[in-house]
Image: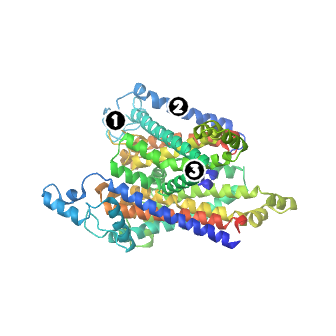
Amino acid sequence: MVARVAASRRSFLGHNYNLVGVIAALVILAWTLIAIFAPYIIPHSIGDIVDDDYFGPMRQGLWLGSDYLGRDMLSRVLMGARYTVGISLAAVVIACFSGVVLGMIAAVTGGWLDTCLSRFLDAMNSIPSKLFGLVVVAAVGSSIPVLILTLAVIYTPGAYRFARALAVNINTMDFMTVARVRGESTIYLIGSEILPNIIRPVLADFGLRFVFIVLLLSGLSFLGLGLQPPLADWGALVRENIGGLPFAAPAVIVPSLAIASLTISVNLLIDNLPKKIRDRNA
Amino acid sequence: MTSGVLNLVLKRLAIALVTLLIVLFAVFFATSMLPGDTASILLGQAATPEAVAGLREAMHLNDPAILRFLLWLVGLLRGDLGTSYANNMPVAALIGGRLLNTMELAGITTLLSVPLALMLGITAAMLRGSVYDRTVTILSIGIISVPEFMVATLAVLLFAVYLRWLPALSSVNEAHSLTDLLRIYAMPVITLTFVISAQMIRMTRAAVIETLSTPYVEMALLKGASRSRMVLRHALPNALGPIVNAVALSLSYLVGGVIIVETIFNYPGIAKLMVDAVATRDLPLIQSCAMIFCLGYLLLITAADIVAIMSNPRLR
């Protein structure tokens, strides 16, 4: 895991990171705004059939064409942003919060608690994520809360491992010993001594994990195990319009591009953060 | 000194075994949570309560979950995977041929992607900062950043829709000649190769660059060794461990990849079997498929860890 994390944090493009980073940040900002304001800016209701033809081409009024039922693709993609970004964000917040808190507690406490937690979460990590999602969604059905929780559970072990590895290093510092001798509580130790020292790499990890979650959510939705109709996130939009693939319809290409633009932007933004923020031992 | 390595490896294997048990446990309980009473589903709506109760008894459904888990485990050890609920066939018989298909797919992908990725990764690291390196890096980051189904969709668009070289769907049953065979495997293998290689290229490149920045490589440079000699004689032998580690880790992405790829291309492998089993709520089948996937995944990441341990000169 450490190797995997390390491998995915190489910098590239040398010194001209600023422009790429800024563009990536703007794309992320744009999708965030769309996710928030989608219901107010969509030209058509997502359920309305507005085109006589299905898989219609791009044209005036239907800027991104129509889907397999003749519904407006632009509206559906904009609303899809809501679900993809919203669900992923909720899941990544839960995953990182619980992972980081548990990781810091394990590092500070040590002993059997650390061993048990690490063993258990490592075992969780040994279940392929897509498989885990598949089994859980099959077991309890698919709804937005179930999806958020499943995704959060899948990515908690990774966040835990990352935070624990960082916190173990901080734990050996002199100021930690001093704080312990002062008799500070565990809550104080993790909140005031460890967290401020690991927060920057943890935030970068947050971004990477967000990408993983977006990809997994899209993958599950693509398999028909994510959001159920009539709701549709970007993965589900690709699935329901896959019939348009032989005609290269915009209905199947646009949601794919939407996913790609979001995930590539987050990856590029993180890769182009100043080294000080990105590196684990900054 | 060697006993230290042996100890670490044995410890890692023990951990893998414990992990396997936990994973089996998790798989069993996740599938036990499937809604609906299995007995009444099997017998249909017209069944009498007595018949349902009888079947529940026969299937040990009234026993505590932990007992059922142990029974299932004992069955596994004897090679008895249970009977499919959907068509009453032994799960082992259902899985057998499908597993072989998936292994073929994974094997061909490995044979293709490992040399390709190693070559691209190492050359990109050698020419670090060049246009070639940037192109390879951007392409691989692009592929990593998009879902597998999108890679598959783009591959279909390119090879089947625009170029018309290959059929979009695959079906192993219709292979009559070598060309048929090539055409059937082509799309799934191309897609998987893209996904796996991208991971491997990034990790290989990172591993080689890390070795290139070590003092002894700098020493070789100062001695006046040529660039290729520096990489091939000094850096590569030392980067071998991390590279093999990266290869094994990347191959574990196959597990997630085949689930999407087999579904999208209708490839008759074990992942497709499992996705179908989820649709029909066929418990024993889901359990066995999930177990096989977890086992493969666990094997690969354990292998990666052991290679990392063995290749660490500080432990030798």
x, y percent for residue B52: 17, 59
Q: Nearer the viewer, residue B81 or B179?
A: B81
Numbered mark located on residue A71 in the image:
1
Residue A193 placement, left or right of B302: right
Q: Nearer the viewer, residue B266 or B258?
A: B258
Letter of the chain that mark 2 sits on in the rendering: A
Q: Residue at x 61, y 46 (%)?
A: A108
Q: CA distance from mark 1 to mark 3?
A: 45 Å
Number of other residues with Cα within 10 Å of mark 3, as a class: few under 14, some 14 to 19, many 20 or more: many
Q: Are marks 2 and 1 in contact (CB under 8 Å)?
A: no
Residue marked by disc 2: A30
Numbered mark located on residue A155 in the image:
none
Amino acid type at circle 1 is Arg
Give the number of callouts: 3
x, y percent for residue B56: 22, 61
Amino acid type at circle 2 is Ala
Residue marked by disc 3: A161
